[in-house]
Each structure stands twice: as C-alpha cells, then as structure tokens.
Amino acid sequence: MHKLPFVDVLAEKQNHARKQDLTSFEYTFQAEITNVYPLTTTEKLYQIQIIDPEERQRFSFQPGQFVMLELPGIGEAPFSISSSPIRHGDIELCIRAVGNMTDFLARVPRGTRVGISGPFGTSFPVEQMQGHDIMLIAGGLGIVPLRAPIFAVLENRNRFGNIDIIYGARNPSELLFTYQYDMWRQFDINLNIIVDTGDADWQGPVGRITTILEQRIAAAPNMGKNTYAIVCGPPVMFKFVCDMLLKAHLPMQQIFVSLERRMHCGRGKCCRCNIGSTYTCLEGPVFDYWSVMNMKEAI
Amino acid sequence: MLFRVFAKDQLINLYDILAVNHIVGPVSKGVDRHGAPLYDFDFIYDFAELQLDYTATIHSLKRFVLPPRETLCTFDLQKDSWQKHVDFNAYKPTVYFGLHACDINALNKLDKVLIGNVYPDPYYAAKRKNMFIIGVGCTPQPFCFCKSMGTDSVLHGFDLFLTDLGDSYFAEIHSARAFAFMSSLECREPRHSEHLRFVEVNQERMNRFTCHVDTTDLTKILDLEFQAEVWQEWGRKCLSCGTCANVCPTCYCYGIEENVDLGLQHATKTKHLYSCNLIDFAEVAGGHNFRPESHDRLKYRYYHKHRGFVEAFEESLCVGCGRCGQSCLANITVPEVIASVRGEGANHA
C-alpha cells in the first residue's frame, strides 16, 4: 500500500517557474470608496482608495488599463481606471448604473469597503506618442477610459504637439466631467463637444461626432503620420471614425481603440471577453487598429 | 522513458498498491437506447468496477479537475469591512486509472492556458498537481478523430501508460513515483520481441481510425470563410444548449456569481462552468449582445478551438475525442462542420 504524497501548491515553491506564490493571483486589495460625485442622473464618479498605504503606493497602472471592482457578495466587474496614473492606488472609476452590481453600487454610501484586483490589460502607449499630435475621440461613456491618457498627457503637456479632444454625447445632460472642460482648455487642448440633440441652454454644435472630425481633418490636410488617435465609444462609432482617420492617412498602428466586453475574471481564463479568439483582458482592452482589423467581430 | 512488462494478473496488485488513495476510473453506466454499453469516469471502490477495455466515456475528466460548480472563496462581512478566504478545494491526491491518450492530452492543453499563462489558475493547479495518471491504450471508435488532431498518442502528462500486448501489459514509466510502484510488482524489462509487439499493436490501432478531419491550413480557412453561408446553416440546426461544452474535455470557460447568506454575515463567490453557445455568453450590462445569433456563437466555438488556441499555443484546443458530436442533440459533429467550412459539402465526414 502506497499513499501518494499530497502536493500543497502553496508550499511548493517551484510550482510555477516565474511566479512562486499562486495565492497572489487571487489577491484582492481591500479598498474604500472615499467619495462619490454624481456626474449625471445615471453616472457617478467613485474615488476609491486602497486602504493599506504600502499596497496603495505599490499599485501602479498605465492609462488604459482596468481593474476588477468587487462588492463582496454582490458581484465583480471590470472598469477602466479614469484617474491619473501618478495617483497610484487612489483611483477614480466612472460607473453608469446599468446592471445588478452597478445599481447596487449607485446606492452605497461613502466609506463602503470594496475589493480591487488588477490592474489588468494593455495600455495606451503614451510615451511612444510623445512629440506627436494627439486626437482623442470619445462617444458617450467612451470618455471614461480616455480620461486617464488625458491626465497623462496634461501632466507632460510640453512633450506633445496639438491635442484635440472630440467628444460626442446624446444630449447636454449626458455630458461627463463638465467641470473639467475649462481646465482642459487652459492646458491648450482643443476641446470640441457635440451633442445629438441640444436643449434650451446648449450653445455648442449639434450633430454627429463625425461632423466635427470631418472639419478637423479638413483644417489640417496633412496631419497623417504625425498624429496618434485614441478612439473609444459605442461599437457603431468605431467603424465610422476609424475609416475617416484612415482616409486622413493615419497609419493603422497609430490609431488606438479601447474595447469593452463582458468579463468574469480579467485574467484570461473565463473566455467571456473573447473577440474572435483574442482575450480582451490580456491582449486588450487597448488595441491598435491593425489588430482590430485582424480580429473578427471586433467592431 | 523506462519500459517494463508485467503479466495481466499483476494489474490487480497495481490497483491494490494504489487503493489507499482515491481512485477514479472508467466504470460501466448501463446501456444506451441501442443496447450499447455506456461508460463514465467515477470513483472506484473495487477492482471489479474498473472497465479498462471501455470504448469511450460520456463525460471527460473535467468534473474532477474543473468542477461544474466550485466555491472560489468566501467572505466574512462585517459592518464596514470584509475578509476574503481562498480555498483551492484540493486536499487529497487522486489516482486516475485508465485514461485514454486524448484525455491526457486534453489535460496537457488545459495546463497551457490555466497554468502556463500570464495568470495561473491556482484552483486548477492545486488539483492538477495532485493527480497520478495511469493511461491505457484505446480502441478507436467510429467518431474518434484524434489522429487528425495529433492527440492519438501522448508524450507527457502521465505517470504510467499501459498498452495491452495480449497476455501482458507494456508499461511506459514517466515518473519516479510510478517507478516506485512498479518495483513492487512482478515486472521485468521488455524483450526485443515485446518491443516489436508493442510497435505492432500501436500500428494496428492506428489503422483502425476511420474518422478524419483535414486540418491543413484550417486557421486560415476559418478566417477566409468567416462570412460563409454554411455557418448560418449550422446555426439554424444548433439548439444553443451547451451540451458540447459540457462533455468537452477542454472547454474551460466559466461565469462567476456571488451570493450573500441569509444572515448577511457571509458571502460566497462561486464559479460555474459555462458554454459559449448559451445566449447570454457575451452579453454586457445594458443589454448589448456581441454574439446574438446561434450561428455567431457556434462559429465562435470553432474559432476558439481550431484557430485562436492554435495561434496562441501552436496546437488545437480540440483533442478529437468526438464526445461533442456524440452528445449533440442536433447531431452536429466537428468533422462535418469543418468539412463543410472547407467547402466539401455538409454531409461529408
């Protein structure tokens, strides 16, 4: 009779060639909602801080990455970080109340303990963009993942050329981060906002985001190779915007999009986020347009 | 690799040596509506239950390594904080007695994505590290196309592999643990005649495969035929029930749900295996479904198995066991789907 020895994967140091402690892959940072700003009727900006000061400092992310936010017992979901990378584990998430977990989140008070795991995914190559013009094009909630690269660019404003933000929303009441528009303009950012339908107080243009983009491209006929574009918005927007950018001679590898999919793990396991057969959580959510063209059913 | 030969009556001794551990193996589960015997993997308590000459099991080994429902962690909820307790749900080593090459290959493929990836899955790793695997040579069934997928033989991922030479077993020993067990049996090094017999037996087995899938350039063909009409046809047949994923030895996708106890003091996070054919697989909050039609989902399944995994790991995620085709309620089989996508007509196998 031979009893097989039990292998404890935690005790076995050589379990994984590079990663010794497998529990670290299931680790959730304990974090606290320090503040909640209602931005519109459905979206709120949550300031979330990792409680342990050391963990907070060690937590670092690149603009474009996301975290899994967990409400123990309620659920876990992925959210793009929309705060500045220099703030480490003191992050801001802009979340629309639209499902089970986000509806619950919309009702929790300040001080609620939540869980954060991550950061996960790829990021916008902000360093590679230095010395170039940048166009950030967002439709609706698409402004949320773009806010991190906007911060990253603002903090090193001298290293970039012209910066355009083109932002479209359905109507003025759905515009997000309105309180920051003046600041962005003061940093010499060309901010263009357009809404599908205006209201009594709306002074700006009315129409599709492509109208503004058309004007912008017409104003700078040879923007081509010197420009990087970041696009995020509803699936239908990507196609039109990216086609226009290609026509304006932007190389495919200088157009970046941030895609959204259902995710249950964020770690390349659950397959829920697959586009074609690419994991959005590992190889995305930030893709260059060449990769998007190569993935079936991406946009 | 070391080789040994032992008489068939020694097999019960091997079983007895290992019987102090949990043993999982193929057992008989009655007969189907045509009177053919059905087999499945289950815990074994008596050597007589072990059916090593089984044809194929209904389910794969997945129930033991990737349980259909698994509690990943529990939370203690306090008024203003929580504590997370992670449990990998692995406490004892288990002997898997009598796996075919396809099932061992399936585990090897799962290892690539669940252990070798950027983020290893500790729940799977803990169970995988506590497996002792004894493989046996199989009898090719009319629906097996493992030869086409390159999974008809296995090179690693097992401790011991037995091939039936008629009156004795030819054992390939692949681990020190297995070698230790073998030294307690009456066995000897194979003679030259047995080498030849071993090669002959395997060659005979090779010749018995009748079902083939042409995988030449399959990754490119799947890309080229992405909009092909045949997908729509298969989509109309598919019931989106997810049975194929249920029996598949390599389907690992899942969903997570969290529940709070009635007392509001504790919460659990549960993983349940899912299927990419179920309608809400890719539906996001707000109601947008990235794969709303059944043909989208069926196509994605083939795309992931035969293209995406190949791109990432240079081998297909399909092992060619044919279980999905056998259990499909709409009689959709992999060889037929792939042949039709290659433009060889829907009914050619």
Image (tube, coloured by chain):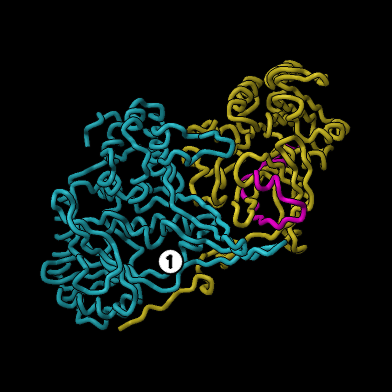
Image x and y of residue A147, in percent? 74, 39
Tell which chain the image draws in cyan.
Answer: B
Q: Quadrant of the C terminus of chain B?
A: top left
Percent coordinates x, y for residue A190 in the rendering: 81, 27
> Where on the picture, by quarter, is residue B105?
bottom left
Q: Report the predominant secondary structure element of the magenta stretch.
A: loop
- Give the labeled residue for mark 1: B127
At 52% from the left and 50% from the top, the residue drawn is: A268
Residue B164 is at least partly visible in this image: yes
Residue A186 located left or right of residue B231: right
Residue at the image point whose x is 14% and y is 60% from the top: B200
Residue A123 colored magenta? yes
Q: Quarter-wise, where is residue B63 in the image?
A: bottom left
Q: Nearer the viewer, residue B236 or A276?
A: B236
In reply to whether residue A132 is colored magenta, the answer given is no
Chain A image colour: yellow
Name the spot of residue B27 as percent of width and height, x first: 23, 64
What kind of residue is marked 1? Lys
Q: Please identify the quarter of the rendering in which residue A55 is found.
A: bottom right
Q: Which residues are magenta?
A: A103-131
- Residue at 47% x, 34% y: name it: B291
